[in-house]
Image: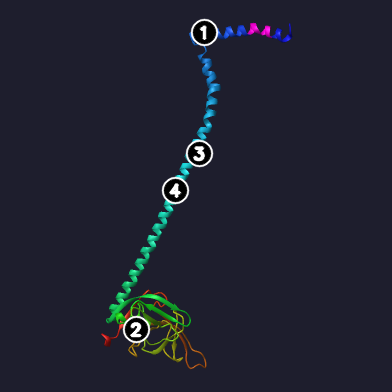
Amino acid sequence: MNPPLRHAAGLTPRWLALSLLCLALVFVDDRYAVLDGVRSGAERLLIEPLRAAAAWPGRLLGAAGEALAERRRLLAENARLRAENLRLRARLLEMAALEAENARLRALLAAAERLGKRVRVAEVLAVRQDYQHQQLVIDKGAADGVHVGQAVLDAEGVMGQVIGVADHSATVLLISDPEHRIPVQNIRNGVRSLAQGKGDPRELDLLYVTPHTDLRPGDLLVTSGLGGRFPANYPVARVDRFEAVPGDPYARVTARPLAGLDRSREVILVWPETRR
């Protein structure tokens, strides 16, 4: 007999015995449940770890999905809050601008009441301010009774005078223009001088002031009323610097305009008494 056949013949009784043993165990377990503990232990030791390992990928994917969804929700909420913050900040700026505009208008009305003359508020439409020209364009013109030479003020002081008129607009020459001169008077002692623009909205020159003239830094200069173009006693500037130059017959005196020549958005047109 070949060796493989002899080996197979030797295994047959063993398989038969093993099969009978398995059948006996099945019968006994089915009848008396003697292997329940063995099965439970095997399930705890072998099956449950395999189930847990098989469930891990699903749990990880679920957790990752939840984290991704939460991140998307937080990003959307953050974007909404940023937009809301920008909207509220814009609203706050708008309210601040409205409050500042109301304050300017109240100051203009108070200034107009102090004048006690025929006045009208106009809005600045355009600006031309450089070293050689200091001018504004306002939204009132001949149709509103505006005329050349008319005084223009703001709530703080003299702005300038009208030099050109159209039907619904007018051009104003500011006191800071190099071509503009305005008679002024020191309110402290009555000393008169002539203020001339120098192309800078922050500074005027006082002309023909001798070194012995009683002018001091901080003195308030008002319109003298000479010439009848500007209402008398309306603020123009404050003396900023007084410098006597040896050998020069006149002192170098500068003054700082009180009107917002480079800031005012509204101005006051003043009609003289004779034009009522």
- Where does the image place residue 262, in percent across and percent down from the top left? 42, 76
Give the amino acid type for the residue marked by disc 4 in the picture: Ala
Please report the residue visible at 32 percent of the width from the left and 72 percent of the height from the top: 105
Mark 4 touches mark 3? (CB < 8 Å):
no
Q: Earlier in the sequence, mark 3 or mark 1?
A: 1
To which residue does mark 4 refer? Answer: 76
x%, y% of residue 133? 45, 82
* Separation of marks 3 and 1 at Cα, in angstroms: 49 Å
Residue 213, label in figure = none
Give how far across and how far down residue 164 sits, in percent: 37, 84
Residue tagged by mark 2? 151
Q: Quadrant of residue 8?
A: top right
Relative to residue 43, is residue 11 drawn left or right?
right
In this view, the residue farthest toward the right is: 2
Residue with the mark numbered 3 = 64
- Label located before the other in sequence (4 or 3): 3
Is residue 11 part of the magenta span, yes or no? Answer: yes
Examine the structure image and report whether residue 266 is included in the region drawn in magenta. no
Count of labels in the image: 4
Q: For the N terminus, which image quadrant?
A: top right
Is 117 left, or right, of 263 in this rendering?
Answer: left
Q: Quadrant of residue 176?
A: bottom left
The amino acid on which the numbered mark 2 sits, given as a three-letter code, is: Ala
Mark 4 and mark 2 in contact? Answer it, CB < 8 Å: no
Mark 1 or mark 2: whose residue is earlier in sequence: 1
Mark 1 and mark 2 residues within 8 Å of each other at the beta carbon? no
| Residue behind mark 1 | 27
Q: Range of the magenta residues?
A: 8-14
- What is the distance, in whole Å, between disc 2 and disc 3 at their CAs? 76 Å
Q: Alpha carbon of mark 1 to alpha carbon of mark 4: how far?
A: 65 Å
